Image: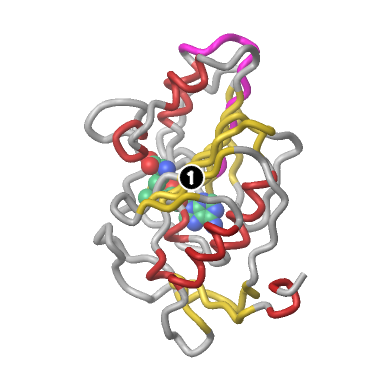
Amino acid sequence: MVANNAMNRERGLAGVNSYARELGFDPLAYLAERAAAPSWLDLCCGEGRALHQAASTLPADAVLTGVDLVGPLAPVPTPPTLELVIASVSHWAPKRTYDLITCVHGLHYVGDQLGLLAGAASWLAPDGLLLAHFDPDSIRWADGSPAGRAAVTALRTAGFRYSARHHRLTLQGARSTRLPFRYLGANPAAGPNYTGQPAVASHYDPDEVTASE
Ligand SMILES: C[S@@+](CC[C@H](N)C(=O)[O-])C[C@H]1O[C@@H](n2cnc3c(N)ncnc32)[C@H](O)[C@@H]1O
């Protein structure tokens, strides 16, 4: 697990340093179009600024949940529609499903990235949407050799779309999926990734049993 004060934890909903910009997608517009009680789970939410801003606009029956290893460094009163959970996304699971799940530059610091993606796929509402930044270069086999291509193939087979240009994974609709990888551990000293920030490398073995299921 990695968290440090050089991380950009303060993205808002829209503008230069924002979720809309990083995701190429407007979370608020998406949620506002939901018929009732829109729900958004933001994994590795940082300060939770985008969630706070969404809470000020969405209806009172909205459900907004942010999870981060580190609580807000600048605490502000939390509106009733927003819950900020201080926990590792590697050991946390929601008790409900969500219309929208995001992980904006959070996977880069998570050990079992593929396990989290499989979990998040099952936390979506039936027609929900998952968006996450993902760096295939951070997925390695046990000996350190690249496993990113195999990971992207497995994710695509499971229904994810991956934009290499934007380093973004998208999944539309909930599903139960088991990716054919067995998590071995992570290297927190793998060095900077495409963002220029130090990131974690996640190591796996092929999971032959799961692959043949
Ligand atoms: C680059 S920041 C992005 C924050 C936010 N998504 C944003 O864009 O403003 C990465 C965040 O991931 C969090 N993080 C790292 N490892 C985590 C873990 N295992 N579980 C939950 N959060 C984690 C860090 O505390 C940090 O707030």
Mark 1 secondary-structure assignment: strand
Q: Position of residue 204 (x, y in %)?
A: 57, 77
- Residue ID at (63%, 31%): 127
The amino acid beneath tag 1 is Thr
Mark 1 crowdedness (10 Å alpha carbons): few <14, some 14-19, many ≥20: many
Residue 46 appears in which quarter of the rendering? top left
Q: Which residue is mark 1?
A: 170
Q: Position of residue 168 (x, y in %)?
A: 40, 49
Depth order, front residue of 164/134? 164
Q: Is residue 59 magenta?
A: yes
On screen, residue 78 above or below 155: above
Depth order, front residue of 190/169? 169
Residue 129 appears in which quarter of the rendering? top right
Image quarter of the C terminus: bottom right
The reply, left or right, for residue 46 in relation to residue 126 is left
Q: Position of residue 3 (x, y in %)?
A: 43, 57
